[in-house]
Amino acid sequence: MAGSIFDHLQEEVQDIIGRYPVKRSALLPLLNLAQREEGYVSEEAMKAIAALLDLTPPQVYETVTFYTMFNLKPIGKFHVQVCKSLMCALVGSDDVIEWIREKLGIRVGQTTDDGLFTLSVVECLGSCATGPMMQINDDYYERLTKETVCRILDELKQQGDCPLKSGPFMVPEPTS
Amino acid sequence: MSQETGQPTVTLTIDGMTITVPKDTLVIEAARQAGVMIPHFCYHPKLAPDANCRMCFVEIEKMPRLQTSCSTKVAEGMVVRTTSPTVQQARKSVLEFILANHPLDCPVCDQGGRCDLQDFSHEYTPPVSRFTELKRVFPKEYFSALIETQMNRCVQCLRCVRYCDQVMDVKALAPQGRGTLTEIKSFGHHELDCEFCGGCVQICPVGAITSRLSMYEFRPWMLKRAETICGYCGDGCEITLQTKENRLIEVNSTLGGGRNNADLCARGFFGYHASTHPDRLTTPLVRKDGHLVEVTWEEALETVAAQVGWVKDEYGPEAIGGLISARCTNEDLYLFQKFMRLVLGTNHLDSSVRYGYMNAIEAFRRVQGLHRWTVTFDDVVAADTLMLIGTNVTETNPITGLKIKEAVKQRGARLITLESLKPVRGTISNIATLATHHLELSPDQFGIGVLGLIKAVFEQGLVDSALEQEAPEYVGALRTKIEAITWDRLLAHSTLTPSMFHAAVRTFEQGARSIVVVGQGVLRSPGGYATMVNIHDVLLLLGRLDRPGCGIAALAEENNEQGAIEMGAVPDLLPGALPVSDPEARRAVAASWGQEPPRTPGLTMMEMIERAKTGHLKALFVVGENPLGSLPPSAGVAEALDRVELLVCQELFLTETAQRAHVVLPACSYAEKDGTCINTEGHTQAVRKAIEPLGESRPDWEIFSALSVLLDSPMEYETAKDLTKEIRNMIPASRVLGPAPLPPRPDREVLRRYILGGYRDDLDGRLTPPPVTKTTGTMTLSFAQSLFHSGKFSTKAKGLLKIQSAGVANLNPQDAERLGVRTGDRIEIRNEGGSAITPVRAWERVPEGVVVFPEHFDQDLRQVMSVTVDPRTGVPYCKLARVSVEKV
Ligand code: SF4
Ligand code: SF4
Ligand code: SF4
Ligand code: FES
């Protein structure tokens, strides 16, 4: 696929496809790869994956839309995912969403004008004991208060990082 | 064990009735056989059970819980209850859940009156729902020009998705999202891009997917139905033409009906409006002072009779010729040749089989001594090895394509393809993606490909030993000839290697039921006849020609090409495909006609054109055929037509040819007449009238009949049925209407004659690769058939025009890049014959160095085509050219 987003990843792509007896099984890992590269799964990426796996684009789209963790639209540099499952809801996830809205001016599903933050709500992230909590990109931020939320967002904006991050502690281990 | 078939059976009880069905039958099917209809949504006999809708619950004794009858197989002694209170309760619940979201759309839904949900709701749901929540509402999105979706109505049975995948192998539909919010879409927000077979429209049990062509036009009970045969391709699908007030409203097909068993293609499903296009000719026209003017039938027929009578008296019957389209019914074709032979006294008659199919017939007759396939569609489905040469099959013969897909996908047949395709999957079938061995050839190289197969058979030592004993000289001669041709020479212009041929023939040889399917790529390219004979050689060498279940299936493009052969609508064959030159055959015909047909052999189409050019052919009858529009200008058809003194056209439209006629007689289309036609595998099927003839148009046969009366040798028939009867009496093989006559076996005597000497006639020519004509910088232009059209007739169908309304030159993306063009840009295609400008599309499946252009829109581009005529079969080759291509 000339000009595809996988051009510079040929080796990794081949390695992924090579892991499975049936090509089609490589669909999810390749979608993950595409999302890692672009932050979301673009139509171009879906077409490229279809061609690689001998599928049609509608078949790839079907899978993408089944999983809520694939983004169909470009997202901000920091993807803020607030847990809204029961445990967090009981200890104030609604407040967290409200604080973020106040601070950044975005609602769930929206991205800030500067392209830095996208706000989503997600199901249980497995930190029920430390709610309310949110995940930003690969990091957890737990026991949130209005102050910590503001500080986290400020520091991410200014320094691209924030020492308040706390995990995730469980798995998966980062691969690199 | 069943008495008749020896198949294992199972006996069970359904609602108190005891029935015996074959082992492995699904309970829902067994119930159907017992006359019990179990309500269902997701089940469909064409699809693998999915059991997702839960509507088909039944109670089975000794089984816990209710069972889905669509996925449960029968077992000995099983006791099934389909109407017990528990079952009824379950049905209610399933429907209540569906109706929780289903809108009250029936008054505005085209499915109303034939909707499963409507019927089941009437039967099983309580009148009030307990749900008070809001219904789900999907934002309305444009889906496509021909197919409409209304996802609020979807019951999520996934029949459409499964059909598009399992049967069509297109995979253009996909469920998107999850749970209640699952929606059937194509690719994201893009418009549907697919084969438009209409299968999803037909298979959706509710009104979630409907046809836009008939939107809001009808209620099912307003429609009149006619079971007839699609007029487009040689597959001969059974269709139900539904009409209202003499208008064609829609097309359906019936499960279990015809050779297609409910499957159709875009042409059959969406192409029906061609018949009633406003441009249809509705009154006879006669040329007066240089203009065609409307006249009465009397005047037109008398003009024809007077003039043709004069030509006959003045110049003799040899000065008259006739051409007929193989889209006509058997009755038309039969009476046409009878009219030419008996009334006018000439054998100068030909039909559109001459454009290519004749190559197959002549080869069949020479080697096998027959003029039909020795296999049927059922054999194709049952084949374990299939080889496709020069055909992507779906474009020309979509249903044959489905049979091949079924053999490969569901029964594990091995597929070898020799085709000008790259095996890239898209949402339009590409048969190469299913191939175990794909030999990619340029469209002018299929002959070379077949030589490669012969060479590989020898090199792999696969020659049938019985043949070697019976005809050592034949085998030896082939071996010597083919050894003299080097692989370097054969494969000079391709990326193929000898080992790919070796592997392909080894695979083919392993099959016990092996069929070769041959398409337009062979039949319409120079050397088509020779290649057809060479394909016979391949099968002979492998010992596969004369085995049951094996054979050669050459694809007819038009719906009744086989009929044209059987009816004798060619210069050298009489009805029953008996040779004109055979005195016995002529006598047999005379027994029915009361007079012998002329014995002098007739002229083929191209010979007639030549004779007309030199002024020797004075009168020409052209019936539904349009040589001026089909052949390139270099064929000189215009010059020929200008010189004839009488040109009579029986036509639906004022075609290029008809515009030059002296008399134009309005004929009616297949939708307006009765008759029969024969599909490519030799099945005779009934064409039935769905609407009254438009204007004053008449069936072709009626016109011949009327003329014969005026010419004093009356051939009078009350109805088409009388003609059918006469035909059946003359041609025993077509006596059977409906189920096929058993396919013939090759004639051993003729086969022997061929391998014991007949092969020699043209061996040198046949086993010589054509000279290399490639000059650097040029490309091969190929006029090919599109899936969405058939000839020029379909370009009058408004539905099909919505899918494809203009010609686009298709190029490999790499070629496009080299030329600096992108999809939508324009290119100039040029050679010594002329030039034309056309838009381009970059398409991954087109091999490099090839330009594929749909022949239906070839008007301007035809100038680059030159015509060569096959020395043995008279087939004009004009589908390939070497051209240079530039960006404009
Ligand atoms: S090919 Fe098109 S029309 Fe046919 S079933 Fe698939 S989506 Fe429907
Ligand atoms: S569109 Fe029709 S066939 Fe397809 S899933 Fe919905 S109800 Fe079933
Ligand atoms: S064009 Fe051929 S395949 Fe399509 S519906 Fe008509 S007969 Fe069938
Ligand atoms: S028909 Fe059996 S579950 Fe749908």
Image: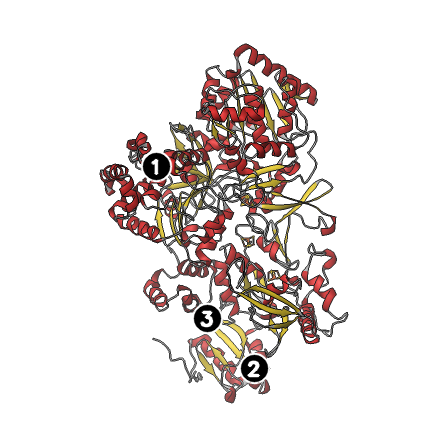
**Type of amino acid under label 2:** Ser
Q: How is the image coloured?
A: secondary structure
Relative to residue A94, is residue B513 depicted above or below?
above
**Residue B517: x percent and y percent?**
42, 45
Say which of B466 and B804 sits in front: B466
Ligand 2's image quarter is bottom right
Instruction: Say which element carries label 1.
Output: helix
The reply to whether label 3 and label 2 mark residues of one chain is: yes
**Residue B393: x percent and y percent?**
46, 46
Say which of B697 and A164 sits in front: B697
Say which of B615 and B376 sits in front: B376
Alpha carbon separation for disc pair 3 and 2: 24 Å
- The crowd level at tag 3 (other Cα within 10 Å; few <14, some 14-19, many 20+) is some
Relative to residue B704, is residue B529 depicted above or below?
below
Q: Which residue is mark 3?
A: A77
**Type of amino acid under label 1:** Arg
Of tags 3 and 2, the one toward the viewer is 2
Identified at 54% across, 22% down, the residue is: B341
Q: Give the left or right position of residue B795, taking residue B301 as reference.
A: left
Which residue is most to the right?
A: B127
Chain bearing mark 1: B
Label of residue A85 in the image:
2
Any part of residue B881 in sight: no
Q: Which residue is mark 1?
A: B752
**Type of amino acid under label 3:** Lys
Instruction: Say which element carries label 2.
Output: loop
